[in-house]
Amino acid sequence: MSEGSVKKAAELLRQGAVMLTDSCPICNYPLFRTKSGDVVCPTHGKVYLVKNDEEEARVKRDIALDSTESILIDGLFTVAKKVKDDPMDTDAIVQVIRYLDAIERLRKINPKQHQ
Ligand SMILES: [Zn+2]
């Protein structure tokens, strides 16, 4: 337990986080639930608590969907820059639309991030 972790824990509490009875699987320090509902370790940041296989599968699915979303957003940003360079680049515009469509679909199956 470093001094930084103690400071971070105090900061979490000040922000309204609640200390949990569960502890971090890595460092064993008590975990906190933030106001936004994330479970965090003062040292390791966001932690996923799983109580059974079903929950583990769900968490893995969420992580996969979240990383897919960030890949799509990166792609969207790349093609959006092409449109900025050449507003008449219709291929790029079509790609922007496809990325937006894909992101929208992804958010439909992964709604928890966008309430
Ligand atoms: Zn930890």
Image (spheres, rainbow, N blue to C red):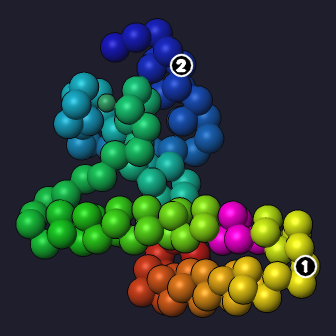
Secondary structure mostly seen in the magenta stretch: helix
Considering depth in this image, is 55 or 110 the residue closer to the camera? Answer: 110
Direction from residue 99 to residue 67 in the image, left or right: left
Q: What kind of element bears circle 1?
A: loop
Looking at the rendering, the quadrant in which ligand 1 lies is: top left
- The magenta region covers 76-80
Q: Is mark 1 within 8 Å of ligand 1?
A: no
Image coordinates of residue 48 in percent, x first then y, are 30, 52
Q: Who's the residue at 54% across and 85% down the image?
A: 102
Q: Is mark 2 within 8 Å of ligand 1?
A: no
Direction from residue 45 to residue 97 in the image, left or right: right
Direction from residue 57 to residue 68 in the image, left or right: right
Q: Who's the residue at 38% across and 32% down the image?
A: 44
Residue for badge 2: 7
Identify which amino acid the numbered label 1 is placed on.
Pro
Quarter-of-image position of residue 30: top left
Judge whether 102 appears above or below 29 on screen: below
Residue for badge 1: 87
In the picture, which quadrant includes the N terminus?
Answer: top left
Does label 2 or label 1 sit earlier along the sequence?
2
